[in-house]
Amino acid sequence: MALDTESFDILLATVQRFVRERLVPAENYLEEHDEVPPALIDEMKELGLFGLTVPEEYGGIGLSVSQEVLVNYELGRTAPAFRSVFGTNIGIGSQGILMDGTPEQKAQYLPRVASGELVMSFALTEPDAGTDAASLKTRAELDGDHYVLNGTKRFITNAPRAGAFTLMARTGGPGAGGVSSFIVDAHTPGIQLGKNDKKMGQRGTKTCDVILENVRVPAANIIGGVPGQGFKTAMKVLDRGRLNISATSCGLASRILDESRRYARERKQFGKAIGEFQLIQAMLADSQAELLAGWALVREVAQRFDGKPTHLSDPDVSMRVSCAKLFATEMVGRVADRGVQIHGGAGYINEYPVERFYRDARLLRLYEGTTQVQQLIIGRELLRQD
Ligand code: COS
């Protein structure tokens, strides 16, 4: 699956322009009001951003992973909250249906996901099951042709905007094999949302608890129709998600570097631009070298990802995805830190984008698997391989 080169070049140029002309100027509004202007959300729908990864047969644009990372790099060059509006639709919210759903589930949900009419969100994490996702406690008990769900999901991105969740619950015994993925209509009786989480950064993204009390979900809504496959679906979804976070991290690093270069040229001390001092140049150089290394890794892994049918998981590709997530998200953390350092005291003042990006970037090392989870996956796979 991929968009033809000519159409893709036009799309990429359009996204670049949209980021530069529409999103970057709205960053201050986003920060102050903690919300994405509704007019911009309409524009995102018109541009097809909600359907970037949904195949054309379901009304989407059908990008390959190699194309998707290029788009995410461009979207990374502004506040991550903008991408988050549709990020769960093109990513973790809908990919489970795309990868493992039945033909009926795909036909029923994907066209509305692609148009943006239906916002989907991914509900795996729980108060007591974060990194140890396979220990999740939300129960799904079979009752006739429905399951009855009880439990709490935590830090669920886009829950307040969601029309449906891809939600993992326990239909069987302990461990990964007892977990199933469900498509849950967000308006089903018994679903309640918690208060919006107050986060360190990424203002404008919406995350909260999703509380399920005797929520009746048709048994036909188990993704793929077979119970006990839900943990694997979640892991496959996260593989693609993690690579896209890596691409976003590279985009953000490039924006922070641009802001830092601009400041280094403008700001004068000791009678000349601070960029003329080698200690400032050293910080810029380290950031540039690390950014190029991270981006090369992301693109290489994306190509490998495209080389595999998405329904097959390949531990070697997963291991490389984890390398990309580990390196790119840690890298943008260092680039953001140097960005603040180059700005000096001004970098600690919220008038400058680097102050915001420093806080925004911190989450990239945490969600969709912490750096330590990536280390675990890489270490385990290295010891398993010949
Ligand atoms: N693709 C397909 N299948 C996968 C997979 C992948 N990437 N990773 C694991 N699986 C399969 C395994 O093959 C195993 O199947 P079998 O039982 O048939 O052998 C099953 O899933 C269980 O896997 P594993 O034994 O690795 O489970 P663990 O509990 O040890 O997993 C980690 C540990 C930490 C890797 C996992 O829980 C994890 O990724 N945690 C982080 C969760 C996360 O990212 N949360 C963020 C929430 S979304 S913002």
Image: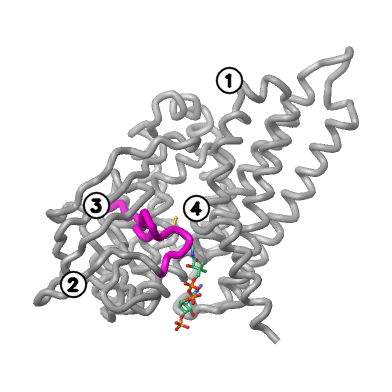
Check disc 1 and report the residue beneath it.
351
Q: Is residue 121 magenta?
A: yes
Instruction: Please give the range of residues in magenta.
Output: 117-134
At which x and y percent is residue 352? 61, 24
Instruction: Specify whether tag 4 is near ligand 1 (CB below 8 Å).
Output: yes
Q: Which residue is mark 2?
A: 141
The residue that disc 4 covers is: 367
Q: Is residue 265 above or below residue 160?
A: above
Q: Residues within 10 Å of mark 2 (few under 14, many from 20)?
A: some
Disc nearer the start of the sequence (2/1) = 2
Distance from Cα at disc 3 to Cα at disc 4: 20 Å
Please rate how many residues cluster around mark 1, counting C-alpha atoms within 10 Å: few if below 14, some from 14 to 19, many from 20: few
Q: What is the CA distance from the residue labelled 1 to the residue labelled 3?
A: 38 Å
Nearest the eye: 368 or 176: 176
Mark 1 sits near ligand 1, with its Cβ under 8 Å away: no
Q: Secondary structure at mark 1?
A: loop
